[in-house]
Amino acid sequence: MYEFIRGKLVHAEPTEVIVDVQGVGYLLNTPINLFGKLPDSGVEVTFYTSFIVRELSHALYGFLSPSERDLFEILLDISGIGPKLALSLCGHLTSYEMQQALLINDGAIFNRVPGIGKKTAERLLIELRGKLDGILPPTPDHLAVPLSDPRAQQIHDAMSALISLGYSQQIAQKAVKKTMADQPNQLPLGEFITHALKNI
């Protein structure tokens, strides 16, 4: 029903925000890791949304990129995973970390999320297999790094950020590649993306 909501950020807490869209305030439930990425109050921001209707409630969930929203909706298809638990998973693990858990068949990665026990982790390992394809932007051969390399997730996160800002896959790849060459030491993600934007 709602693909995205764009408006001025009025209020933000670790798990929810209020956005003013032409005088109407929308309350969005958000993953906890989104809080540190938000702009200051009064700045226009776009949230990609998922509208969940339950018998006793209607709620909007907001994310900064379509891929984060898609991940949330994929998690909702898993038996036993409701909006609250799906949001917790999105807030504590990236799609890359979830894919890593599936690759090495390690449910302990899911167990790091509050509310996820052993049985639920095992169910996630089974039911998520093959469903996360396409959530991460593809990494070309000249950017590929092993899962154990600390830069691996950063590359994927930076690619996702640039693509969500409207840049093409090719432009994002060139910018990330040049940033990796210019900055051989690992930077915080925000600084890495800032450098990548300068290289576009």
Image (tube, rainbow, N blue to C red):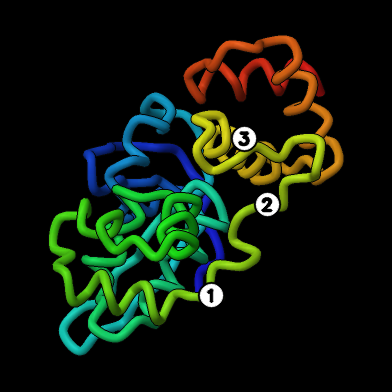
As drawn, 184 above or below 116: above
Query: Disc 1 marks which residue?
Result: 131
As drawn, 30 above or below 14: below
Decide if residue 77 is in sight here.
yes
Q: Position of residue 88 (x, y in %)?
A: 25, 57
Indicate the quadrant where residue 8 lies.
top left
Total numbered labels: 3
Say whether disc 2 or disc 1 marks the residue closer to the N-terminus: 1
Say whether disc 3 or disc 1 marks the residue closer to the N-terminus: 1
The residue nearer to you, when weighing 53 against 85, is 85
- Residue 137 circle label: 2
Query: Disc 3 marks which residue?
Result: 155
Looking at the image, residue 44 sits to the left or right of residue 125; the answer is right
Helix, strand or loop under label 2: loop
Label 3 and label 1: CA atoms lie apart by: 21 Å
Quadrant of the frame with the C terminus? top right
Q: Position of residue 32 (x, y in %)?
A: 27, 44
Looking at the image, residue 161 sits to the left or right of residue 94; the answer is right
**Residue visible at 62% across and 44% down in the picture:** 160
The residue nearer to you, when weighing 115 against 46, is 115
Look at label 1 and name its amino acid: Lys
